[in-house]
Image: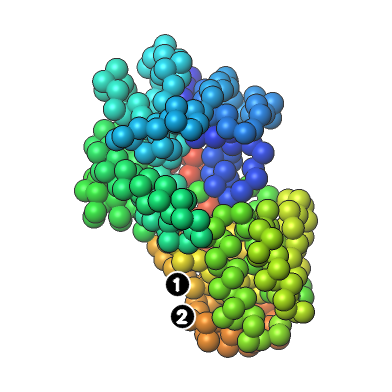
Amino acid sequence: MEKHLHIIDFTVPYPVTHGGLFDLFYKLPALQQQGVQIHLHCFLYNNLAQQMLNQYCHSVHYYPRLTGHQALSINLPYIVSSRINETLLQNLLQNDYPILMEGIHTTYLLKDKRFRDRKKFVRIHNVEHLYYQDLAKTSSSYFKKIYYFRESGLLKKYEASVVHEATAFWGVTHKDVQFFRNHLHCNTVDYLPVYLPETWKVKPLTPIGSYCLYQGDLSVAINEQAVLWLLENVFSKITIPFVVAGKNPSSMLQSKIYQYNHCCLVNNPSEKEMQDMIAKAHIHVIYAESEAGIKLKLLNALFNGRHCIANATCVKGSGLETLCHIAADAADFCYTISNLFNTPFKEDCSQMRKSVLEKMFNNTQNAQQQLAWIWGK
């Protein structure tokens, strides 16, 4: 019997321009290989329809995302209310296929009585209200702070209101799963690792790289704050080469980086350029003040790079703690970086990563598990 599955994505999951889209996009070929006929529903927002999606999906539908005052709601978070679309709901009602909703963003139908008897599944990418709290704390804009705090409050109420409305929830980290169980009293939540590019395999690298690297979407306030913290508290103290690479850095961040002769910025590198920089770095410096979700930059570094130094917040609940050097504070970062920069990355480190990562992040096995949960086999 053919298996048909509706997937609702909160955006268009290709091209994969940032970490949050990895799981959305790479699950498509993995599920297709298991014989699933995917009916993909995407929200367009400053991006265009992507022909590549057609090769993985039985059908692809696009819907406009509401913006501005059109999407404002007294009770619903903006990320949810801006994705209410009756055409989408009518398309889903044409059959009784299971529905997979990507992120809390796409879960409005859980409030709709017409879907009460449908199989409905939610992929949790973050505990969203905590993520928006972190955005509020790190934003330098007064108006953005107000928006993020308001959205966080609405999300907290909304997440609590829907945890018993879906058939099941799947988190990307053990930490998120435990939060849903312990704080939101959700007893239908399980851990499902993120889907990753099939090209990500732990490969032997030469023992010595050339510099320390931080990589990420620099237009996101949380990432900008991370780089500023590293510059002011770590790389102002040590003169080891430090490369910052990522998307759309602000002029303020650029000027801060250029204050240090041993630091440089690579602005908007291509995916190929980014992967090349990751392979050439000797130390990957991963710092974050937010516990939200899983850090794709960390996974990329562990699969494709050498030494990784991270603060505890970055790895908490990820299952990756044993693969990283954990720095407790700025002094610890300075000490560990200084020691590791002349320490070869050995083959046994690669083998340890291989044994952990390729077992945990196996797209085929994870797709099979996901289908077993959906169809009960």
Residue in view at x 48 percent, y 81 percent: 329
Extreme residue toward the top, this view: 94
Give the x, y percent position of residue 55.
Answer: 66, 26
Q: Could you tell me if residue 377 is visible in this image? A: no
What's the CA distance linking mark 1 and mark 2? 7 Å
Give the x, y percent position of residue 347.
Answer: 67, 74
Q: Which residue is mark 2?
A: 328
Extreme residue toward the front, this view: 142
Residue in view at x 52 percent, y 82 percent: 330
82 vs 51, left or right, is left
Q: Residues within 10 Å of mark 2 (few under 14, many from 20)?
A: few
Above/below status of 256 relative to 92: below
Q: Which residue is mark 1?
A: 312
Give the x, y percent position of residue 135.
Answer: 45, 56
Extreme residue toward the left, this view: 185
Residue type marked 2: Ala
| Circle 1/circle 2 CB separation < 8 Å | yes
Disc marking residue 89? none
Describe the colour scheme in one phrase. Answer: rainbow
Give the x, y percent position of residue 272.
Answer: 77, 52
Element under label 1?
A: helix
- Quadrant occupied by the C terminus: top left
Numbered-mark total:
2
Residue in view at x 31 percent, y 48 percent: 153
Residue type marked 1: Ala
Instruction: Work out whether mark 1 precedes mark 2 in sequence or the reverse, and give the earlier one.
Output: 1
Q: Residues within 10 Å of mark 1 (few under 14, many from 20)?
A: many
